[in-house]
Amino acid sequence: MLPEPTPETRHFWDGCQAGELRLQRCTDCQESYFPPRPFCPKCGSRKVEVYKASGEAVLWSYVINQRPRPDMGTEPYAIAVVKLAEGPTMMTNIVDCPQTPEALQLDMPLKVSFSKQSDTISLPLFAPAK
């Protein structure tokens, strides 16, 4: 199952297709936020802008799924929450490293990468920063 972009999330999914992590920021209180929505979750303002984020994050929390769905392969994989350098948190998967507690250290620096799933959807994934 892939996400279905809506008018409120189209900028995010278009950014992922272009290899950019796009966030929103309130122009009144300057708070960056995720997931996308047409108003600021902190102050309620509708004066928001879309901008290209750095793609940098740290591993905030995770669980290793030992019983993946059939369409996800047979190997365990990490379902993670990362804290973006801009402040918001995002649920994602960690890639390009062993899926073990020894390798998945909390606060480890991460960098976004994108996995093309279809002609219209690329998913943001995070890998250890080099």
Image: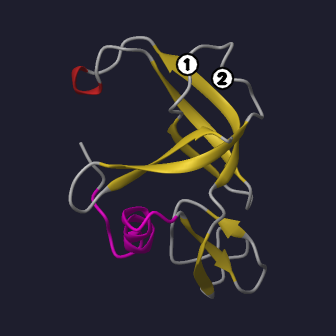
Q: How far from the left and from the top, in percent, is residue 4? A: 27, 59
Q: How far from the left and from the top, in percent, is residue 21? A: 53, 63
Disc 2 residue crowd, few under 14, some 14–19, many 20+, Cα 10 Å: many
The kind of residue on which mark 2 rests is Leu
| Horizontal relation, residue 102 to residue 75: left or right | right
Q: Pick the residue in front: 109 or 93.
A: 109
Find out whether residue 87 is within the magenta segment: no
Residue 98: assigned label:
1
Q: Quadrant of residue 44?
A: bottom right
The kind of residue on which mark 1 rests is Pro
Work out which quarter of the rendered image holds the C terminus and state it: top right
Q: How far from the left and from the top, in percent, is residue 75? A: 37, 14
Q: Quadrant of residue 34?
A: bottom right
Q: Quadrant of residue 8?
A: bottom left
Give yes or no for contact between labels 2 and 1 (Cβ–Cβ under 8 Å).
yes
Q: Residue at x 38, y 65 (%)?
A: 13
| Horizontal relation, residue 68 to residue 32: left or right | left
Find out whether residue 15 is within the magenta segment: yes
Disc 1 residue crowd, few under 14, some 14–19, many 20+, Cα 10 Å: few
- In this view, the residue farthest toward the front is 130
| Horizontal relation, residue 41 to residue 37: left or right | right
Q: How is the image coloured?
A: secondary structure
Q: CA distance from mark 2 to mark 1?
A: 8 Å
Circle 2 SS class: loop
Q: Residue at x 69, y 68 (%)?
A: 32
Q: Residue at x 57, y 33 (%)?
A: 80
Residue marked by disc 2: 104
Q: Who comes first in sequence, dot 2 or dot 1?
A: 1
Span of residues in magenta: 4-20
36 w.r.t. 77: above or below:
below
48 w.r.t. 8: above or below:
below
